[in-house]
Amino acid sequence: MKVKIESSKIIKPFYEDSIFPPSTRTYIPLSVFDKVTYEAQIAIIYAYRPPTPPNAAIQLGLQKALAIYREWAGRLGKDEHDNPVILLNDEGVRFVEASADSTLDKVMPFKPSASLLNLHPSLNNVVELVQVQVTRFTCGSLVVGFTAHHTVADGHSTSNFLVAWGQACRGLDINPLPLHDRTIFNPRNPPLIEYEHKGTEFMSKSVKKENSLNENTHHVTEDIVVHKVHFTVEFLAKLKAKASSMNNNNNKPYSTFESLVAHLWRAITKARGLSGFETTHIRISVNGRMRLNPRVPNEYFGNLVLWAFPTSKVKDLLREPLPYATKLIHDAVTKVNNNYFRSFIDFANHKEEDLIPTADMSKHILCPNLEVDSWLRFPFYDLDFGTGCPYMFMPSYFPTEGMMFLLPSFIGDGSIDAFIPLFQDNLPTFKKICYSLDLLEN
């Protein structure tokens, strides 16, 4: 698949029915949740069958959506006190038009590989906070590559923006409107820090330096392969039943997400061939909108995520049956509640100067640990430019060993696709056991 760039330009918000556009000298301070998240661009890819709308209609819809979500058209910067902010300067986002030399059917389904990087603008050294690439295939199909800076918004907010973009393309009013106020997370007086946040969300700069020195990046890109696994509804139902078979949680079964992540944690750990005495954990995102009290509206635009870190010795994880790992995950996620979020807000407002976030997209190897990014509840399939929803979406190519993505399958029947980066040497073992409910118990 050869992709040719036809044009690349900066587009700015379009303010309909506005005699006086808003000031471009204002800014929005970053919240403690923005400051602790990944400082990186994330990319996703959509595919649409013909008929598809013209590029001009997609661009105009984007410009209208940017007039409501102005943060994306701004830039990251500092205020007069050197605090990090989003400058609402309307400098715009990048819009790239491209063409491919084949039909979409010839390259579908997309396999996780470096060729996906041709379908969206580069993530390196980018000042724009959003970038879009529309690639036309010879059959009339359309692929939209979208990149966004994580400091501006989490997956929940970004998916709301994408839905709004589609509404604007279809001539609809954007609904619901975003809540832009990032100053709502006030620390308590006096602060009440009930949990350990150093070593969890934050680490000292010296620890980060030591970790960087210890990471072996030799032949990293050649040694890591991103493997896509499809889990059917039937398999997931059996997995959930098995994971919940020893659950004393008021006889309430564990969720499909908890069961699947527990299964993958065990399978990947076994495939890695780790020593039984090593410790392994998973980093799992927890959305604070549903946890904080009073509840933060779903329309809140920004980052509002912390993480759970279920942890186990390798020997216990593999020796104990599946419900053991599932309970570890359930309990760790449950702990990240209102009290935990409030404790974090207090700590982050009074933290030591040399502490930096543990969230780090520059790491290539997470072993013996894992991270799971779940997109199962985001309305990504609702991005309709006017000719129907996408028939497929997926993350771009992120070859970070141990960083999994979970997505609803494009089949639309409740099945799940998992994108799992592993070392090439660990892949044969993983393939043997990833669909087995019993092999790990043998």
Image (cartoon, rainbow, N blue to C red):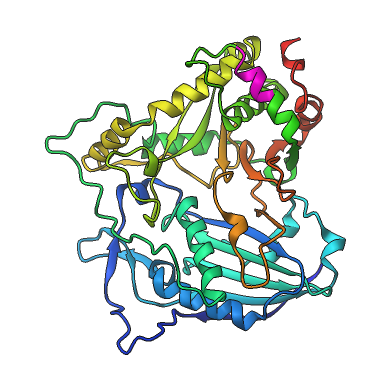
Residue 426 x/y as whole percent: 75, 29
Q: Is residue 175 magenta?
A: no
Q: Specify the quadrant that holds the N terminus.
A: bottom right
* Residue occupying the far left of the picture: 190
Give me the residue at 58% from left, 34% from top.
Answer: 366
Q: Which of 3 and 153 is in front in this view?
A: 153
Image vertical order of residue 8 relative to residue 41, above or below: below
Q: In which quarter of the image is residue 331?
A: top left
Quarter of the C terminus within the rendering: top right
Outermost residue, right side: 106
Q: Position of residue 255 (x, y in %)?
A: 56, 29
Residue 125, visible in the rendered structure: no
Q: Where is residue 351 in the image (x, y as percent from the top left)?
A: 25, 39
> Does 373 appear above or below 268?
below
Along the horizontal axis of the image, is 364 left or right of 227? left
Of helix, strand and loop, which mostly describes the magenta segment? helix
Is 240 one of the magenta-colored residues? yes
Q: State the extent of the magenta-drawn residues as a range.
A: 239-245
Q: How many labels does the image show?
A: 0
Q: Vertical placement of 219 versus 7: above or below?
A: above
Residue 220 in view in this figure: yes
Residue 344 against residue 132 in the figure, above or below: above
Residue drawn at x 42%, y 27% as measured from the top left: 334
Expressed as whole percent of the image width and height from the top left, the position of residue 277 reads 58, 12
Q: Is residue 95 left or right of residue 80?
A: right
- Give 304 or 85, whichever is nearer the viewer: 304
Of residue 255 and residue 346, the one placed in the foreground of this image is 255
Q: Going by the image, does 158 lie left or right of 133? A: left
State which quadrant residue 173 falls in.
bottom left
